[in-house]
Image: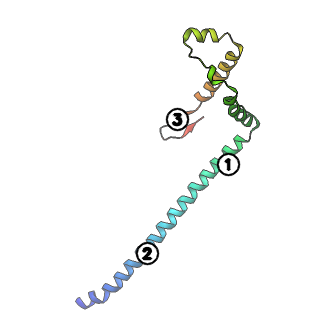
């Protein structure tokens, strides 16, 4: 029996080493497949966002959004309290701006963050 153990030991050792190598290869393949699936999912999301960014209204929005900081005279900005706000509301430009802010607020309220981090619209 001792001789059998001695004869089998190298074979079992080689078999175990081969098994470990194969399992590592399989694990690497699985990790690579998972990585490729994650990349694919990310690309699908990215292309969806790119399509939305290509919409004419979205492009126009970003053009205005990137232009307005250079059009504002930041040195003329004053602190405004509650009374100043009431006074400023008489200005039609302020009223238009508040209208835009209200529409954005409504749109933002439609997006709710779920517990797992996904969004629901």
15 horizontally vs 85: left or right: left
User: Which residue is at the front of the view, 56 or 3?
Assistant: 56
| Mark 1, residue position | 47
Q: How many marks can you see?
A: 3
Quarter in which the N terminus is drawn: bottom left
User: Which residue is at the front of the view, 46 or 79?
Assistant: 79
Q: Quadrant of residue 60?
A: top right
First in residue order: circle 1 vs circle 3: 1
Q: Residues within 10 Å of mark 3 (few under 14, many from 20)?
A: few
Q: Position of residue 52 (x, y in %)?
A: 70, 41
User: Which residue is at the front of the view, 48 or 79?
Assistant: 79
**Disc nearest the viewer among 1 and 3:** 1
Query: Residue lying furthest bottom in this view?
Result: 3
First in residue order: circle 2 vs circle 1: 2
**Disc nearest the viewer among 2 and 1:** 1
> Looking at the image, which residue is at 68% across and 32% down?
65
Q: Position of residue 13 (x, y in %)?
A: 34, 81
In the rendered view, tell whether residue 22 sits above or below residue 114. below
> Looking at the image, which residue is at 62% across and 22% down?
75
SS class, disc 3: strand
Q: Quadrant of residue 85?
A: top right
Q: Position of residue 24 (x, y in %)?
A: 44, 70
The mark found on residue 64 in the picture is none
SS class, disc 1: helix
6 horizontally vs 47: left or right: left
| Mark 2, residue position | 21
The mark found on residue 113 in the picture is 3
Asked if residue 1 can be seen in this view, the reply is: no
Q: Residues within 10 Å of mark 2 (few under 14, many from 20)?
A: few
Q: Position of residue 121 (x, y in %)?
A: 60, 34
Q: CA distance from mark 2 to mark 1?
A: 39 Å
Query: Residue lying furthest left in this view?
Result: 2
């Amino acid at each position: 029996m001792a001789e059998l153990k001695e004869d089998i030991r190298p074979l079992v050792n080689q078999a175990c080493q081969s098994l470990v190598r194969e399992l590592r290869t399989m694990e690497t393949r699985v990790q690579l497949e998972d990585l490729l699936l994650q990349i694919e999912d990310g690309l699908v999301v990215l292309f969806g966002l790119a399509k939305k960014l290509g919409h004419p209204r979205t492009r126009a929005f970003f053009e205005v959004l990137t232009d307005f900081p250079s059009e504002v005279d930041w040195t003329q900005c004053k602190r405004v309290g509650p009374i100043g706000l009431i006074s400023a509301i008489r200005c039609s430009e302020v009223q238009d701006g508040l209208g835009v802010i209200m529409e954005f607020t409504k749109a933002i309220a439609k997006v709710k963050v779920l517990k797992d981090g996904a969004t629901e619209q």
